[in-house]
Structures are given as structure tokens and as C-alpha cells.
Image (cartoon, grey):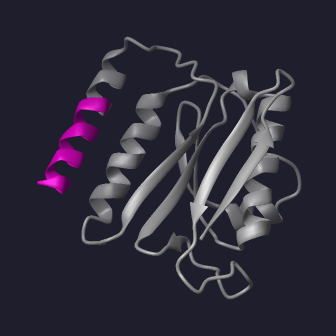
């Protein structure tokens, strides 16, 4: 069984659609508080750069709070602008007053490096990990050396884990 979320993302008739699988026998009630679904883990990666300020970050926070309230699963939350914070979860976001702060530049290299580090630290885990990105896609330096290096390192880690 799976739950689908389709929630408005912006005023331009765009929607975020997310499908979350639930293990057999799970009802998503109060007992379902871990951050895994079956043999997999979901991590939400949210762009908190200045270009996400206003309604984009507000809508993303609404979606994330709704996912937590519906599933009661404490999924990890990576937030990034020019640096990445990997200490949050959907529960901590749901409990905080106000939305995430959106400011600064955007560095996909920062979040890709954090993902690589997370995968290396958890390489013994047999769970598949799915990363869901919520971003406007505007990197400050899309052709930059740091981005290219972080993508190559992430590819190297992923290829090593699948072989």
C-alpha cells in the first residue's frame, strides 16, 4: 500500500507529487515513527537559498509538515544554500515555529557532498536511500569546479556501492 501526496507548490498551478510506500501491515499510525519504509529510507533535501524565499519555502514547509502529520515518520531533512545542515528531521520542522529561513546563495556542490558523506557513513546499511529534492534549480555556479568535483565524487561512491 502507498500514500500519495499532491500539494500545490506555487501560484503557477504547479504541484509536488510524492508517493510513499508503506510496509505491509503498516497503517501509518502513531507506532510508525521511524524514518524508513520497509527496506528503504527517504531523505528530503530542501533548497533554502534566497531565491526560495517567500511562497516557495512556505509551500515546501507546508508539504513537509503535511507528510509528517500524515505518516508520523521522522524522515531526515537536509537543508542547503551555500552550506548543508543534516541535523534536521521532518519532526523537528513540524515542531518549530515558523518556516525554514531562505537566504544566501545556492550550492548544489554542498548538498551533493553531504549526500556522499552520509552514504559513506551509512554504507553498512542494507536500506535503499531515496533523496527527494525540493528546489527551484538555480545553482549560483552551475559550471563551477566544486559542483563538477562533488558530482564526480558522488558518482564514484554510488558506483562503489552498487558493484
Furthest-left residue in this view: 163
Where residue 127 sits in the image (x, y, percent)?
A: 36, 69
Q: Position of residue 150 (x, y in %)?
A: 31, 32
Which residues make up the magenta segment?
A: 151-163
* Residue 113 falls left or right of residue 130: left
The quarter of the rendered structure image containing the N terminus is bottom right
In the picture provided, is 70 more to the left or to the right than 113? Answer: right
Picture coordinates of residue 112, whole percent (x, y) = 40, 38
Direction front: furthest residue: 1
Which residue does the image show at 73% across and 60% down from the upper left? 67
Say if 63 sits above or below 15 in the image. Answer: below
Give the vertical position of 143 relative to 156 (above or below): above
Residue shown at the point (58%, 86%) measured from the top left: 25
96 or 62: nearer the viewer:
62
Magenta segment, prevailing SS (helix, strand or loop): helix
Rendered location of residue 65, percent (x, y): 78, 57
Which residue is depicted at the point 37% across and 56% down? 118
**Which corner quadrant holds the C terminus?**
bottom left
Q: In this view, does 25 lie above or below 93?
A: below
The quadrant in which residue 2 appears is bottom right
Residue 157 can be seen, yes or no: yes
User: Is residue 1 shown left or right of residue 131?
Assistant: right
Is residue 153 found inside the magenta-colored segment of the image?
A: yes
Dividing the picture into quarters, in which one does residue 119 lie? bottom left
Nearest the eye: 78 or 136: 136
Q: Which of 78 and 128 is in front in this view?
A: 128
125 shown above or below 76:
below
Q: Does the magenta stretch include residue 62?
A: no
Q: Can residue 100 be seen in this view?
A: no
Residue at x-position 21% and y-position 47%:
157
Amino acid at each position: 500500500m502507498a500514500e500519495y501526496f499532491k500539494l500545490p507548490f506555487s501560484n503557477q498551478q504547479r504541484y509536488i507529487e510524492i508517493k510513499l510506500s508503506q510496509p505491509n501491515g503498516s497503517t501509518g499510525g502513531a507506532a510508525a515513527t521511524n524514518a524508513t519504509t520497509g527496506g528503504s529510507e527517504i531523505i528530503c533535501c530542501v533548497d533554502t537559498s534566497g531565491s526560495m524565499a517567500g511562497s516557495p519555502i512556505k509551500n515546501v514547509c507546508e508539504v513537509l509538515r503535511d507528510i509528517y502529520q500524515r505518516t508520523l515518520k521522522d524522515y531526515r531533512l537536509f537543508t542547503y544554500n551555500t552550506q548543508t545542515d543534516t541535523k534536521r528531521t521532518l519532526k523537528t520542522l513540524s515542531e518549530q515555529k515558523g518556516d525554514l529561513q531562505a537566504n544566501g546563495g545556492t550550492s548544489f556542490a554542498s548538498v551533493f557532498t553531504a549526500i556522499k558523506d552520509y552514504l559513506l557513513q551509512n554504507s553498512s546499511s542494507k536500506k535503499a536511500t531515496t533523496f527527494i529534492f525540493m528546489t527551484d534549480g538555480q545553482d549560483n555556479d552551475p559550471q563551477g569546479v566544486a559542483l563538477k568535483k562533488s558530482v564526480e565524487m558522488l558518482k564514484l561512491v554510488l558506483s562503489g556501492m552498487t558493484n
